[in-house]
Amino acid sequence: MPGEVCPRCATRRVGAFRFCLSCGFDYDTVPTFWDMESESSAASDTEPDQTVAAAPVVAAIEEAPHPAAAEPARVIVSGPPSVAWSPPAPRAVGGRDGSIVALGVAAILGVAALIGLLRGPTHGISAAEALARSSDTPGPSVAVSLPAAGDASPAAPASVSTSDGTGSAAPSGPSPTPTTQTAIVVKVIDGETIEVLLDHAPRIVRYLSIDVPGAPPDPIATLARDLNNSLVGGQQVILERDVTDIDDQGRLLRHVWRVGADGQPILVSEQIVLAGLALPSGGQPDVKYSARLSTALQTAKDRKVGMWSTP
């Protein structure tokens, strides 16, 4: 009837059409209010004690779709919203957690210290440290006069003069010449061999004219290595060439000198022989200091030191 709406699409019924002009729904399939009233009255007259089933109404309600929802308003966003992000605040460690962290750090430091004690002293420095030492600003220029060849005195003096005229400045070594060069010792290998940084390159240097018997852990060889380390480990040294340049292993063959605290040059191989920890080799043709080393050997025997301490 006019005034009704379509239960399917909610369009108002037009005139007396028996179907919906929008969706084609047949209005005859749905009982009207008056039909429902009449049926209810008839049922109540015949069966007054029974409840009238509302199945048709329910069916009609279930069949009818929900009314079309209104289209939501459109919102135009001109880009993603900018959100200022800030990192989360660090969690403060305190109480029991702080105690656990402190105990863990203390334990790690203790283990590291114990490992250092067990390893004992090292016998060299890193190449980086050697580079740093070699690149330091040099002090006053130094002219070192090494002892003349054939000088048999272990304590023979050598003249040292500095550019400031005081003679007390710590020398930085002579300028390189065809027979001498300065280098930094980065590692002591044994009592007669060292590794040096020479012209920013690592080189192995074998001392000329001496031999250390045995090899670590042999007692004499170990003492020779330790003495060698105390004399030149991490120090600047002077490498003096004799006749032979390198051996068949590619090692530089040199007489090695270190300038002492009093400014006097010290022949390292001579000090090892004086301690009774090495023997002069005296091999040809590198015999520049053979007489000097022979005198040192006799001194060690007289003092009964090192290998000469027992008959």
Image (spheres, rainbow, N blue to C red):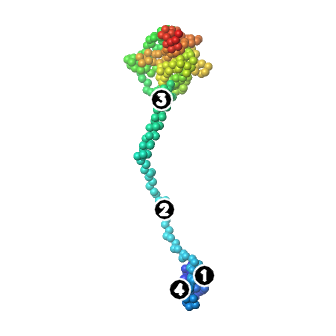
Q: CA distance from mark 3 to mark 2?
A: 68 Å
Residue 200, horizontal then vertical, whole percent: 52, 27
Mark positioned earlier in the residue sequence (4 or 3): 4
| Residue drawn where x is 60% and y is 85% of the image | 28
Report helix, strand or loop for mark 1.
loop
Q: Which residue is mark 3?
A: 117
| Residue drawn where x is 50% and y is 9% of the image | 301
Of badges 4 and 2, the one in the foreground is: 4
The dot on residue 25 is: 1
> Badge 3: few (under 14), some or many (20 or more) residues near its Cα, within 10 Å?
few
Mark positioned earlier in the residue sequence (4 or 2): 4
| Residue drawn where x is 44% and y is 51% of the image | 88
Quick check: 164 left or right of 213? left
Question: Callout 3, which amino acid?
Answer: Leu
Q: Quadrant of residue 253?
A: top right
Q: CA distance from mark 4 to mark 3?
A: 104 Å
Label 1 close to label 3 by CB (< 8 Å): no
121, 99: nearer the viewer? 99
Mark positioned earlier in the residue sequence (4 or 1): 4
Q: Which residue is mark 2?
A: 78
Residue 145, horizontal then vertical, whole percent: 46, 14
Of badges 1 and 3, the one in the foreground is: 3
Report helix, strand or loop for mark 3.
helix
Q: CA distance from mark 4 to mark 2?
A: 46 Å
> Badge 1: few (under 14), some or many (20 or more) residues near its Cα, within 10 Å?
some
> Badge 2: few (under 14), some or many (20 or more) residues near its Cα, within 10 Å?
few
Mark positioned earlier in the residue sequence (1 or 2): 1
Asked if residue 203 is positioned above or below residue 309 in the image, the reply reads below
